[in-house]
Amino acid sequence: MPAYVIFIRERTLDPSELAAYAKAAGPSLEGPPIKFLAAYGRH
């Protein structure tokens, strides 16, 4: 089943919160293959 996600980050207010998010988000990328259709800038 196709799914689409749009992620927008304008600025980081608390770098430690962003690091905690990155650690928790990593496992969500496991499983079926993911195809990134577009990316802009550093993520």
Image (cartoon, rainbow, N blue to C red):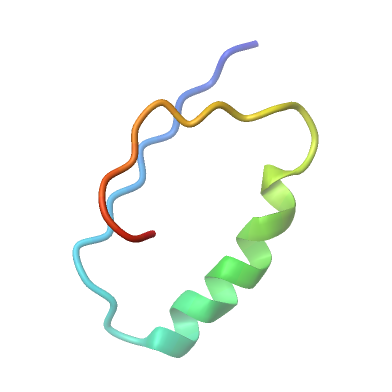
- The total number of labels drawn is 0
Q: Toward the viewer: 14 or 32?
A: 32
Quarter-of-image position of residue 27: bottom right
Residue at 26% x, 46% y is: 40
Quarter-of-image position of residue 26: bottom right
- Residue 1, given in percent of the width and then of the height, sits at 65, 11
Say whether residue 4 is left or right of residue 13. right
Quarter-of-image position of residue 37: top left
Task: Determine whether 33 is above or below 42 in the image.
Answer: above
Q: Residue furthest left?
A: 10
Say whether residue 16 is left or right of residue 23. left
- Residue 8, given in percent of the width and then of the height, sits at 28, 50
Say whether residue 23 is left or right of residue 5. right
Residue at 47% x, 88% y is: 16
Residue at 66% x, 66% y is: 24
Q: Toward the viewer: 17 or 40?
A: 40
- Residue 29, given in percent of the width and then of the height, sits at 68, 44
Task: Determine whether 4 is above or below 43 in the image.
Answer: above
Q: Residue furthest front?
A: 41
Q: Residue furthest top?
A: 1
Position of the C terminus by quadrant: bottom left
Q: Toward the viewer: 7 or 33?
A: 33
Residue at 62% x, 30% y is: 34
- Residue 30, given in percent of the width and then of the height, sits at 76, 43
